[in-house]
Image (tube, helix red, strand yellow):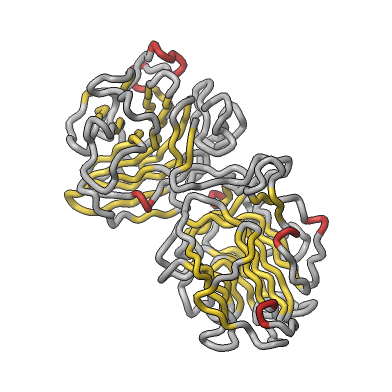
Amino acid sequence: MAFLIGGANSAADTGYDIANSCRLDGSSAYMGLTLGTATNNKIYTFSAWVKRSKLAQYSVMFNAGGQRDCLRFRGDNERLHFFTGEATTAGLATNRVFRDITAWMHIVCAVDTTQATAANRVKLYVNGVQETSFAVTNYPAEDFTNVINSDVENRIGKASNQYDEYFGGYMAEVFFIDGQQLAPTSFGEYDEDSPQIWKPKDCKDDLTFGNNGFYLDFEDSSNLGNDANGGTDFSETNLAATDQTSDSPTNNFCTLNPLSNRTSSGTVTAADFSEGNCKVDHDDANTVTIAPGTMAVSSGKWYFEAKVDDAGGDANIGIISASADLSGQQGTSGHPSMYYGSNGKSCYNVIASNDGDSFGDTYTDGDIISVALDLDNNVIWFAKNGTWQDSGDPTSGATATGAAYSGTGTSDGFPTTSSFYLPVTVGYNSFIVSANFGNPPYANSSSVADANGYGDFEYAPPSGFLAICTKNLGSDGG
């Protein structure tokens, strides 16, 4: 059994899978294309699946010309905001806010300024439902000519050069339709078995794109700006092959959770999260940063890796109880945490005490730590660069050969009172760790998936151990 912290959901498992997404760093990465003569630049539809990673900053999904022609999330209140160039106040801003960095959502912006009724000129949809409650309501004038869909640079993930409003997160299935105002049902549908779940559908061949239309599927890691509809490709800025991920609306992967990031005293740290919340950088003397994952597991066998970019004062990689009170001091017996530290020690409740037991080799910059968590037998193992420490054997099950911790009800094991665990990175003073739950923010020298074919790991997961992603939840692994 497993659940997603923060209520994150991916689309239901269907016959149509989205293989890839593009990870944008929220600080410098974007793509742009100068469009040609539009079929009708008063009418267009933009559709994309997005998973946010950066909050408290203006995050532009689509833009053209100046800052005032864009679809974005506002950084001051996290509202979905459509902004036009007609006036500084023109546009729509939802009352609803969007702060979930664990979930994929489908955004559609459908524009037709030829409509006589103002409310029909711009329609915003989230997961198939039209937004109708707005904090700002100022529709474009009838027959207003949009800058978006005109012969200027149109951008994915960034506002104009005058403003640093970059999108931080993941984008998938990006469609632009020139000359039609479409409903979300052109791109998605409700699941037959779970009618509350909005999911993508295979729609490319059913769409008429118009002169400037495009489709970005991000399936070519060497050309992430490729127009899979056959048009001119987007130019990429500060995007690399590692920004192609398999984290998608049809298979949501675990990441680190900056919303739960805390110091040992319970305050939010100044740690920087980047690479789609797969990398944490903490530099604050005499403080501890706790950076848990977004998905908790309670049974099954799970595998993840973490690359140590900078071991700093003291890096630790392991798990923490999902019931831990992150608003206050960690490390009590009811809120266990189990780590492998860069000092070579295995640490239980390391937040409360930096003392630990001698366990394995020390590790430092560039090393990759593997974690094998067996919650069917309540055992955890750690490896350094592919070698399981203390001659560990994750396939030994309840025998727990070479395990760092095993058993329940012990003073330094898995308590009977806690059933859900989160992957976590913990560091003291300064440290930089890149977590790999199957979508590494760095290039592996090898590429190994789990037994179900999910994930991209440096080292092979032990038999029966799976990547932490939604397609594996409820499978043989958990």
Q: Which residue shows up at 72% across the image and 87% down it?
A: 143
Between 474 and 274, the one nearer to me in the picture: 474
Q: Which residue shows up at 74% across the image and 71% down it?
A: 181
Left or right relative to 24: residue 12? right
- Is any atom of residue 430 visible in this view? no
Q: Which residue shows up at 74% across the image and 77% down it?
A: 43
Depicted 138 relative to depicted 442: above or below: below
Q: Quadrant of residue 311?
A: top left
Q: Residue furthest top?
A: 399
Between 16 and 6, the one nearer to me in the picture: 6
Q: Which residue shows up at 53% across the image and 77% down it?
A: 160
Q: Position of residue 478 (x, y in %)?
A: 52, 27
Q: Position of residue 248 (x, y in %)?
A: 60, 48
Left or right relative to 72: residue 319? left
Q: Quadrant of residue 120?
A: bottom right
Q: Position of residue 466 (x, y in %)?
A: 52, 29
- Is any atom of residue 442 visible in this view? yes
Q: Number of callouts in the render?
A: 0
Depicted 315 relative to depicted 465: above or below: below
Q: Position of residue 354 (x, y in %)?
A: 18, 35
Between 414 and 432, the one nearer to me in the picture: 414
